[in-house]
Amino acid sequence: MEFLSPTDYAKQFVLAVQEYSQLSWRSVANVFRPPRYIADTLQQADFIGVGSLPIVILTGFFTGAVLAVNASRTLQQFGSLSLTGQLVSISMVRELGPVLTGLMVAGRNASGMASELGSMKVTEQIDAMRALGTDPYKKLVTPRMLATTVMLFFLTIISDLTGLAGGWAVARLFLHLDSRQYWNNAYQNLMFGDVFMVLLKPGLFGFLVATIGCYYGISATGGTQGVGRATTQAVVAASVMILIVNYFVAQLLLPLLH
């Protein structure tokens, strides 16, 4: 591993931020410019959305179930066991649903994008595309960005619903709560701000996952070893950025929406 001085490291960091910002801007601007690779976008949407369904459903269901188990022990001490549905719904819709879905999609798809584009980069396929007059950012990055942003929105909704279903299963089978009472508490206590988070966070997280995965793939160097390194860096960077952006979104918007 090459050791860098603090100055060189800072320069590389600033350069990486600049290159990532340019890639992000070009991926958005290319949406409004022809040609539009609709077939590639639909193919990526199928791979990202449908392919991620099993892991998203499992994650959401068991997250909601464990929320109900842990919450019931505390609520029972105060005689408020009936509020289990409210706690599960607010926790899943406001925070855990979008964040966990984003992390699952980042682990599955950011690594796939980085490895696929990284392999194309080290085998000079991207350079061949440029030589043939095709913009690799428009052909490779924009369809993945669009597909991830749109599909993560629907995956988050599915994760929230399965999380509520997991909490209901625990509440009905083990806590012996009435199903109607559970669903009424889960639904009636959701506010506009909670629903707005579901609309906003998946779009931000999807954009981050796609652009970070594509950035590390396109900037990969050093052969197959560099592709493996880029794949690892893409997953780590996307996961960390999801957690950071989630904090700032909550910090800035929650006081305005409640």
Image (spheres, helix red, strand yellow):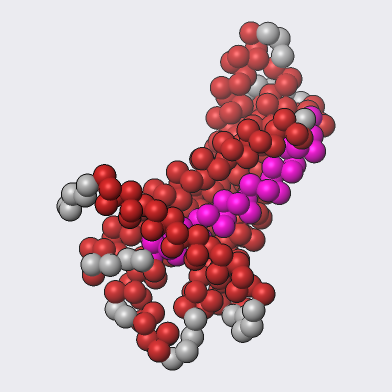
Q: Is residue 199 above or below residue 115?
A: above
Which x, y percent locates residue 256?
75, 34
Q: Nearer the viewer, residue 216 or 11?
A: 11
Left or right: where 92 falls relative to 123: right
Which x, y percent locates residue 182?
75, 29
The residue sitting at 64% across, 83% down in the picture is 34
Residue placed farthest to the bottom in the image? 132
Q: Is residue 153 above or below residue 78?
A: below
- Classify residue 225 by image quadrant: bottom left
Q: Which residues are magenta?
A: 189-217
The residue sitting at 49% across, 81% down in the picture is 135
The residue sitting at 58% across, 28% down in the picture is 67
Q: Is residue 4 above or below residue 140?
A: above
Is residue 206 a member of the stretch shown in magenta? yes
Q: Is residue 100 above or below residue 16?
A: above
Q: Nearer the viewer, residue 53 or 145?
A: 145
Residue placed farthest to the front in the image? 7
Which x, y percent locates residue 6?
26, 44
The residue sitting at 77% across, 30% down in the picture is 258
Does the rendering let one see residue 155? Answer: no
Q: Magenta stretch: dominant SS?
A: helix
Is residue 119 a member of the stretch shown in magenta? no
Does the rendering let one see residue 197? Answer: yes
